Amino acid sequence: MNAYFPSTNKPDIKALVEAFSLNTVEDILGRTVTPPQWDVLAPYLQSFAIAESQTLITQGTVDRTVYFIESGSLSVHYEDSTGRVRLAILAAGSAVGEGGFFSHVPRSATVQAVSACKLWRLTAIKFAELSNRHPAIALGLVMGLGGLIATRMTDQRKRIAVT
C-alpha cells in the first residue's frame, strides 16, 4: 500500500503571509486564511519571479492558475480595438487570476509586472489535491478568493480586472 507522506521540505512562505497581513486595501485572504492554514497550503504552491515588464497573464488565454503576490506590483489592463486601458495596479498581499481559476473561460485582461515580482502560483490540479486532503483550508481559500471577486466587482473600473 502506498501512503501519502507530506513533503518535509515546505516552501518558506513567511514573506507571503506577511504581505497578506499588511494588505488592508481590498483583499480578504489575510482574514480568511490564517497563518497556520497558509503553512498547510504552502506545499501546494510554487514560487517564481518575473522581471519588470514581463507578462504574467495574457488576455484571451485559457488557464486556471491563481497567483499570489509576495513582492512587487502588477498592472492589469484590458486591450480592445481602441487601445490599452489600465484597470488596476496590484501590490504585495494581493491575488490575481481568480476569474479564470473559477470560470474556465478566457482571461479577461492582461497582467504585466510594473516592477520585479515574487509570486506564488496555485494550479487547478494542486487545488484539487488540497481540496481532497484539507477541505477546510481549501474552503477558506475559496471564500477569500470569492470575497476578492465580490470586492472587485463593486468597483466599475475594476470589474474587468477580475482576470
Image (cartoon, rainbow, N blue to C red):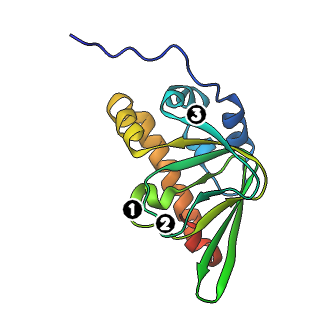
- x 51%, y 50%: residue: 66
Q: Dot 2 lies on which element?
A: loop
Instruction: Name the residue type under label 1.
Output: Ser
Residue 159 screen position, x and y as percent: 57, 73
Eyeballing the image, is 77 above or below 146? below
* Rendering coords of residue 46 (x, y %): 55, 35
- Frontmost of labels 1 and 2 is 2
Q: Earlier in the sequence, mark 3 or mark 2?
A: 3
Q: Is residue 87 shown above or below 50?
A: below
Give the residue type at disc 2: Arg
Q: CA distance from mark 1 to mark 3?
A: 25 Å
The quarter of the picture where residue 52 lies is: bottom right
Q: Nearer the viewer, residue 72 or 33?
A: 72
Spatial CA distance of label 1 from label 2 is 9 Å
Say whether marks 1 and 3 touch (CB < 8 Å). Answer: no
Quadrant, the N terminus: top left
Q: Which residue is mark 1?
A: 103
Position of 93 relative to 90 (above/below):
above
- In the picture as drawn, the residue positioned furthest to the bottom comes out as 82
Q: Secondary structure at mark 3?
A: loop
- Taking depth in this image into account, of 14 and 33 the one nearest to the observer is 14
Q: Position of residue 137 (x, y in %)?
A: 45, 35
The answer to which of 149 and 7 lies nearer the viewer is 7
What is the crowding at mark 1: few (fewer than 14 residues within 10 Å), some, or many (at least 20)? few
- Residue at 29% from the left image edge and 13% from the top image edge: 3
User: Which label sits on residue 70?
Assistant: none
| First along the sequence among labels 1 and 3 | 3
Q: Which residue is mark 2?
A: 107
Residue at x 41% of width, y 42% of height: 139
The residue tagged 3 is: 34
Q: Secondary structure at mark 1?
A: helix
